[in-house]
Structures are given as structure tokens and as C-alpha cells.
Amino acid sequence: MIDEVARPEAVSKAEEREGGFAPILGIELDRAYRVAGRILGNSAEAEDAIQEALERAWVSWHTLRTPEAAQGWFWRILVNGCRSRLRKRRSQPIRDISEAIDFGVADPLVAMLARDVVGRAMHVLNEDQRVAVALRYWGELTVPEIADRMRVPEGTVKSRLHSALAALRRE
């Protein structure tokens, strides 16, 4: 009898949690894929980074104080995940399976990166510059929004963007 009383409460809390998660973060997925793809330069890794960010956000959803902070919070999780992948890549280079196997299906991100001169030149940027450029130009965020997501002052974001654009021009 006690279990029957406790179950509806648990279900309603789970439904409430799920009901707030999908509408708030679901709208960010397309932009998140573009940004993660630019930061990482690999579609499979971008998909994995987004999946991990969503999983971390879901597990910690109950710790979020206000739904208004959800988008910035999710972006910080995603960017930090991308940064971790970049650091790991230095010690363990990755090889995309699509390089070894022809699946016969063109990946739009891979095609876009192959066409795009800027995409090919992103390798000259350091981790912080790459994140700032991806958030600004593919994430379409403002300097204050980038500063919030990267947890750095606006001047630092401007400096990183300036030096990154100079490096991209040289490349």
C-alpha cells in the first residue's frame, strides 16, 4: 500500500523533469551539432560529444535552479566536453571509421568541412580560440554569451577571437 502511494509521486516528478528537459534543450541540438562539429572537426565525435552533454545534463537536471539558465548551462557542459575531447586527442589520435569504410552515405558535416576553407584552417587555432570561433560564427552567439559559456571575461573572448581570426587569415 505504501508503494502504491509513493509510485504516483515518483512518476509525476519524473514526468515533470522530462517535460522541462526536452522543450528547453531540444531546440539547441542543431546549433550544438554545428558548433561541436566545428570545434572537433569530426562528425562522429561531434555526435558523441552532444550525446555525452545531453546525458550529463539529464543526470544533473535536478540541480538546475531555474529553467532560464538551462541553455547556458547546457552549452558549458557541451563546450567542456569538446575541450576534453581535444585534450584527449593530443595523446590518442582518432581515426574516423568512415575513412576506412565507405558507407555510401555522404555525411553533411564532413562534406561541409571538406568544402570550407575556414574549416580546414581551424587546425592552426589553439583550443580556446577554436571554441570561441565556433561559438561566435557557427553557434551565432554574442561576445557576452560566449564569455558566459566559457566563464571568462568579455575582453578575453574578444582577444581570442581577434588572434584566432588573424591566424585564420594567415593560414
Image (spheres, helix red, strand yellow):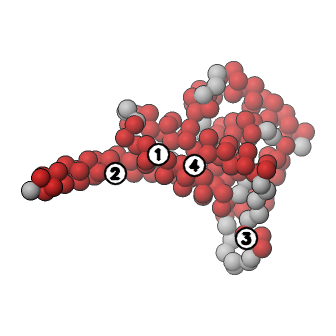
Q: CA distance from mark 4 to mark 1?
A: 14 Å
SS at badge 4: helix
Q: Looking at numbered disc 3 in the image, what kind of residue is underneath it?
A: Ser
In the rendering, which numbered label is found on residue 74? none
Q: Looking at numbered disc 1 in the image, what kind of residue is underneath it?
A: Ala
Do labels 4 and 3 touch, CB within 8 Å?
no
Depth order, front residue of 164/14: 14
The residue that mark 4 highlights is 32
SS at badge 3: helix
Q: Residue at x 77, y 70 (%)?
A: 99
Q: Earlier in the sequence, mark 1 or mark 3?
A: 1
The residue that mark 3 highlights is 98
Q: In the rendered image, which quarter is residue 67 located in?
A: top left
Quadrant of the frame with the C terminus: top right
Q: Tell whether 82 sits left or right of 51.
A: right
- Categorize mark 4 by other alpha carbons within 10 Å: few (<14), some (14-19), many (20+): many
Residue 42 visible in the picture:
yes
Q: Judge depth for marks 4 and 3 and give the one in front.
A: 3
In the rendering, which numbered label is found on residue 57? 1
Where is residue 92 drawn, in percent x and y?
A: 77, 55
- Categorize mark 3 by other alpha carbons within 10 Å: few (<14), some (14-19), many (20+): some
Q: Earlier in the sequence, mark 4 or mark 1?
A: 4
Q: Residue at x 78, y 29 (%)?
A: 162
The residue that mark 2 highlights is 18
Q: CA distance from mark 1 to mark 3?
A: 29 Å
Q: Tell whether 100 sits left or right of 153.
A: right
SS at badge 1: helix
Q: Earlier in the sequence, mark 3 or mark 2?
A: 2
Q: Earlier in the sequence, mark 1 or mark 2?
A: 2
Depth order, front residue of 53/22: 53
